[in-house]
Image (cartoon, grey):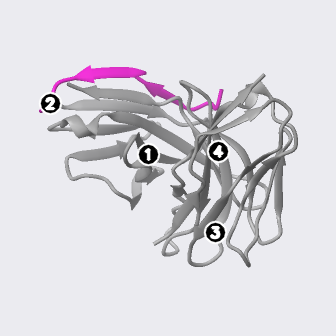
Amino acid sequence: DSGVTQTPKHLITATGQRVTLRCSPRSGDLSVYWYQQSLDQGLQFLIQYYNGEERAKGNILERFSAQQFPDLHSELNLSSLELGDSALYFCASSVRDGKGTYEQYFGPGTRLTVT
Amino acid sequence: GDSVTQMEGPVTLSEEAFLTINCTYTATGYPSLFWYVQYPGEGLQLLLKATKADDKGSNKGFEATYRKETTSFHLEKGSVQVSDSAVYFCALSASYSGAGSYQLTFGKGTKLSVIP
């Protein structure tokens, strides 16, 4: 158990709809990263938040957005869903180890199926 | 941009066989290198890491050495077990633009199946 929790585990929805994925980082971790895992694109970085503020953006579509709340949990919002958005969405939180390296610990993921 | 290339799978080995999964990278600066493992139906688990040239990461019998001259980080295990069956991802992280972001860039993953 990594200590990172994600809800829901599975989500099935229709094209055009909007969903919200939730992530709670490990206790004390200030950074949350979101990744998408799909068969054709592999694992791709979407966006990072650090202590409530957006820190970096990757290959995130304009239809997607995220935020991090004062209690450090994060939500990823996906709107106007398309079939191609079906994927596993992971969040990870990071901690700096004793040698200054940032290790990321992943949640179990949310499997999104768009029909 | 940064990229990671790892050998295509799937790889099928008999129990107690030697495992090598090749990984090479392209990055500016001095990235940290990682191997993550994903068991069926689960999230990614950090297997091992290395942060500078010639560092060797090791865990659970797996090893990988950070080779700057060949930009490689190959994963090895001397004797695999059925329980090692999983997908293995090589990844790198670098601080981008000094912004303090350490997002991971992943390879496409290598599926390992170990048969008794």
Number of numbered discs on residues: 4
Residue at mark 4 shares a chain with residue at mark 2: no
Residue ID for mark 2: A15
Q: Position of residue B51 (x, y in %)?
A: 74, 64
Q: Nearer the viewer, mark 2 or mark 1?
A: 2
Q: Residue at x 24, y 39 (%)?
A: A84
Residue at mark 2 shares a chain with residue at mark 1: yes
Report the chain holding disc 1.
Answer: A
Mark 4 or mark 3: which comes first in sequence? 3
Label 4 to label 2: alpha-carbon separation: 32 Å
Q: Is residue A114 found left or right of B113 in the rendered image?
A: left
Q: Quadrant of residue B73?
A: bottom right
Label 1 to label 3: alpha-carbon separation: 19 Å
Q: Which residues are magenta?
A: A1-16
Which quadrant, please, contains the C terminus of chain B? Answer: top right
Q: How many residues crowd around disc 2 within 10 Å: few (fewer than 14), some, or many (20 or more)?
A: some
Amino acid type, residue under disc 2 in the picture: Thr
Amino acid type, residue under disc 4 in the picture: Tyr
| Mark seen at residue A44 | none
Q: How many residues crowd around disc 3 within 10 Å: few (fewer than 14), some, or many (20 or more)?
A: many
Q: How many residues crowd around disc 4 within 10 Å: few (fewer than 14), some, or many (20 or more)?
A: some
Amino acid type, residue under disc 1 in the picture: Tyr
Residue ID for mark 3: B31
Mark 2 or mark 1: which comes first in sequence? 2
